[in-house]
Image: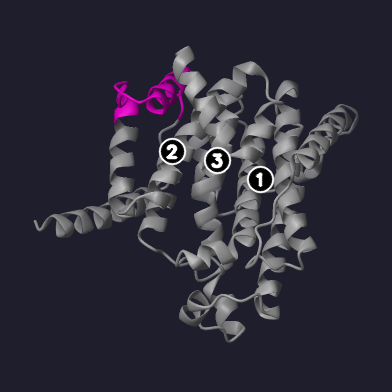
Amino acid sequence: MIDAADMAHCREAIRTGSLSFHAASRMLPNKVRDPALALYAFCRLADDLVDDGDDKRDAVLRLRDRLDLAYRGTPSNRPADRAFAAMISDHDMPRVLPEALLEGLAWDALGRRYDTLSDLYGYSARVASAVGAMMCVLMGVRDEHALARACDLGVAMQLTNIARDVGEDARAGRIYLPGDWLRDAGIDEAAFLRDPRPTPEIRGMVNRLLSDAQRLYGRAEAGIGALPLSARPGIFAARHIYAAIGSAVRANGCDSIGPRARTGKARKTALMGVSLVRTGVTLAMPRSAVIYAPPLPETAYLVAAARRETPRREWQQGLIEVFAELERHDRTRAGI
């Protein structure tokens, strides 16, 4: 069980750090909401440490050590770590899933670029779909089809985030738009990072990301009906709130270089009402055949991991290699 004081800390961290998830979480049943908040608080902590730290690579290595302690049952003496360790124990959380998230953060720390849309899916699988798979585990859902659709939702959400943050990322020296898209448009990455502008070509790429996200939101909906009834409103709310971010970007003419697109409190409240209606519709509608669509190739290993199946060897090797690269940097920095 998660300690009450640690739980209060997690709630506050999410309330101030992740407005969209905080809004959606209010519609989850208590038995899912509290461990979900513990999960998101740890994930938020991880993301902030890497984004805000002076040495992003060292931050990921420290997070790896904290994750290891949590899985040993001896978490670091921090509220989020203690709550996360209790969540792991209570729900038998497969370690592959948070490790996938950590691998995605390691890619960020290493400044990895994504040459194709499939590469971007692979990144999105790690930093977002892994969280969706963990949410399914918290709900007691390990059905392969429901897990595949949860992973679709994670990729859709991350593509939405990327589309919204093109300018913000560029000003921080990051770019997530696929490299082949930029080359086809005749855009030099270094020049764009020096002077990001919402050209028609960049707006077109933002629109392509949002269109792909919309397709995946549609696929994801087929899986919501496979979740416990009490959890459906919260997941519908997350789906609609994130999709509304994409709508706000489109309302700005797909200009995500200038002001950051947002959804206000009133809009979120209205979308939560829509989510309740959509939950009622799932009770009357037959299950969509879309639920049986195979998982995206980039998320298939997460589906297998959530079902307690052995992860593919190439994923394990990739994880070993990325941490070896981080450790080489750490030794070089220390003069060893």
Query: The disc labelled 2 sits on which kind of residue?
Result: Leu
Q: Earlier in the sequence, mark 2 or mark 3?
A: 2
> Along the horizontal axis of the image, is 87 left or right of 201?
left
Q: Please tell me whether mark 1 sits on a helix, a strand or a loop.
A: helix
Q: What's the residue type where badge 1 is placed?
A: Leu
Q: Determine whether label 2 and label 1 are within 8 Å by CB.
A: no
Over which residues does the magenta segment extend?
Answer: 69-93
Q: Nearer the viewer, residue 288 or 78?
A: 78
The front one of 67 and 313 is 67
Residue tagged 1: 153
Query: Residue at the location (48% across, 39% down)?
Result: 44
Query: Can residue 310 be seen by looking at this rendering?
Result: no
Q: Mark 2 vs mark 1: which is more N-terminal?
A: 2
Judged left or right of residue 242, residue 131 is: left
Which residue lies under the disc numbered 2?
Answer: 45
Residue 301 at x, y = what percent? 50, 46
- Furthest-front residue in this view: 259
